[in-house]
Amino acid sequence: MTTTVTATPATKAPKGPAQASERATAENKLGLKLVAPAVILMLIVTAWPMLQALYLSLFRYRLTTPDERDFVGFGNYVTALSDPLFWQDLWNTVLIMVVSVGVELVIGFAFAMVMHRIIFARGVIRTSILIPYGIITVVSAFAWQFAFSLNNGFVNSWFSWLPGIDENMNWFGSHWPAMFAIIVSEIWKTTPFMALLLLAGLSQVSEDMLEAAKVDGATWWQRLWKVILPNMRAAIMVAVLFRALDAFRIFDNIYVMTKGAQGTESSSFLTYRQVIEQFQLGMGSALSVLLFLSVLILAFGIVKLFKVDLAQARGEG
Amino acid sequence: MNRKTGVGTWIGFIAILVWCLLPVVWILSLSFKPVAETTVGSAQFLPKSWTLQNYQDIISNPDFTRALLNSFGISLIATLLAVIFATFAAYAIARLDFKGKRLVLSIALAIAMFPVVALVGPLFDLWRTIGLFNTWPGLIIPYMSFTLPLAIWTLSAFFREIPWEMEQAAQVDGATSWQAFRKVIVPLAAPGVFTAAILTFFFAWNEFVLAISLTSSTASRTVPAQLSFFVGPDPFNPPYSQLATASVVVTVPVIILVLLFQRKIVAGLTSGAVKG
């Protein structure tokens, strides 16, 4: 902080000999006061229920029989971790996350390149790309569910020339096609977000450097891999981190498109089903804690593995 | 720099438009198909015969209009409150020196990544106990908590760019502190606040997990939740064209916001994460 006199803390600073430190104390106090409401609000809805979940996860507790609440220790965790369904759902979640983030990275980068280079109709393209971003996920899920529908969809008739697809293909009748449809909806909806983050990174790559590489005889491919991508590393990593954690929570698309049928359930969906549909608060809480831990491990892993520095990416470094 | 628009860019331009708009055109087309046509099965893209009947049905469906009202009310109130709290916090983060600044930003980041489903159980239990289950505040409170991180990050990035010295300059020129704030700082900060508000609104408008878990009737059920419950008389044959119509109706506000404020939304989305 520079020594500019700020109006608000100055008026609040009480009289005293040590002016500078008094002012610092006042500023400190005001800062805490201003952030307190937001922090309290954020913690009330997350930290408190999470502690509650930790506690409830140690009981066999079903809302249909609330009086029969038994302490079972880590019993719920043992049950969950030894059930193949838990691992199947975790595998689905990771698969959806990896495939969608990977595909989005490639398509999003292509989109960002186009948006970066285009010199006409920038408003049109920006508007169109924000529509999938802004659209309700449930609506996206419905649109794609209908598109893939056996009786009412256009996918079967448009793509019947592809091997394996014919007029009577039932996309939601078996595991892999259903997963494919879910991933398509996920990718469609979130690629714009990826593209915009990558575009911001792309605009930070210096044109002079690219020009210099060109003069030195670097091919397009070399410029892409040696100049552009290394220079937008921070932007790519932030985009991957945000999207991976977001994709890991996938729920809406699955709920609308398959309701978890054909083994397409995700970890989030499993947790939801235990709590809301089966009223298994104990087991559901254990799954909540496991889900929370998975997200923590995932976030930690990505940050460590790719050395994402959020502060640096934001220019705070 | 002189850049030509190459063939590749043209192809890319068309590809982006098709990618973004095809599913939207698809539900739009579906919404004009008569119910009888989709019940039998209508695999072609455009309707065989066009009708506006679905729109009339949807608009006169009390469950849907009620859900629309809930969605607007809950999203707008949550947005307003979240942006007010976020403005205080972001001002402090951008402007003041205080202990725990990094901690606040870390908490915000952690909450932005929080698996919402993990909270559904305990919140469901808590809300039933204190009577917030199936009420507007029951959704507004968690929506505020989950949009605050995004709003704080976006706003603090915006506030850092404001030339705050201008406030003193105005005061030196004889303005009172209130005038300096009102005439100098507010106009500079308003675009950022506005952008944060749009992003917050999108989140609340879109939210689904809490909307289906913490509501049980049309008293507080929002549109995404209502849509997922809207199966019609035959659960094995959902009313495709009516669902598509409802989808179109709830997408209209999104499209209006995007058309009006595309530049601001892009700035807000990227400033929160990557700053130039």
Image: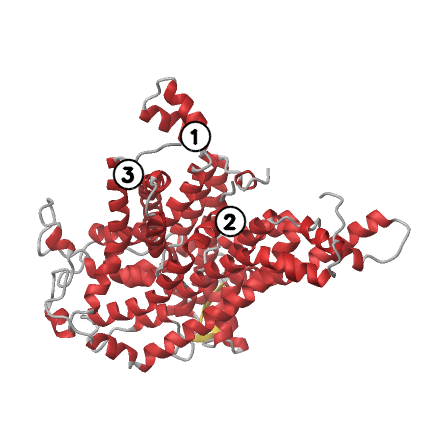
Sooner in the amino-acid sequence: mark 3 or mark 2: 3
Label 3 element class: helix
Q: Which amino acid type is shown beneath numbered disc 1? A: Glu
Q: Chain of mark 2?
A: B
Kindly identify the residue that appears in the image at 41 percent across and 63 percent down.
B207
Q: Do pointers 1 and 2 mark residues of a single chain? A: no
Q: Residue furthest right?
A: A17
Q: Badge 1: few (under 14), some or many (20 or more) residues near its Cα, within 10 Å? A: few
Q: Nearer the viewer, residue A159 or A97?
A: A159
Q: Which amino acid type is shown beneath numbered disc 2? A: Gly
Is B86 placed left or right of B175 in the picture? Answer: left
Alpha-carbon span between mark 3 and mark 2 = 28 Å
Kindly identify the residue that appears in the image at 69 percent across and 51 percent down.
B96
Q: Quadrant of residue A279?
A: bottom left
User: In the image, which disc is placed on residue B272?
Assistant: 2
Question: In the rendering, at what x and y percent does residue B119 appear?
Answer: 48, 62
Question: In the rendering, at what x and y percent does residue B130 appear?
Answer: 55, 76
Q: Nearer the viewer, residue B64 or A207?
A: A207
Q: Which residue is mark 3?
A: B9
Question: In the rendering, at what x and y percent does residue B30 appear?
Answer: 19, 66
Q: Do pointers 1 and 3 mark residues of a single chain? A: no
Q: Which residue is mark 1?
A: A207
Label 2 element class: helix
Q: Which amino acid type is shown beneath numbered disc 3? A: Thr
Q: Chain of mark 3?
A: B
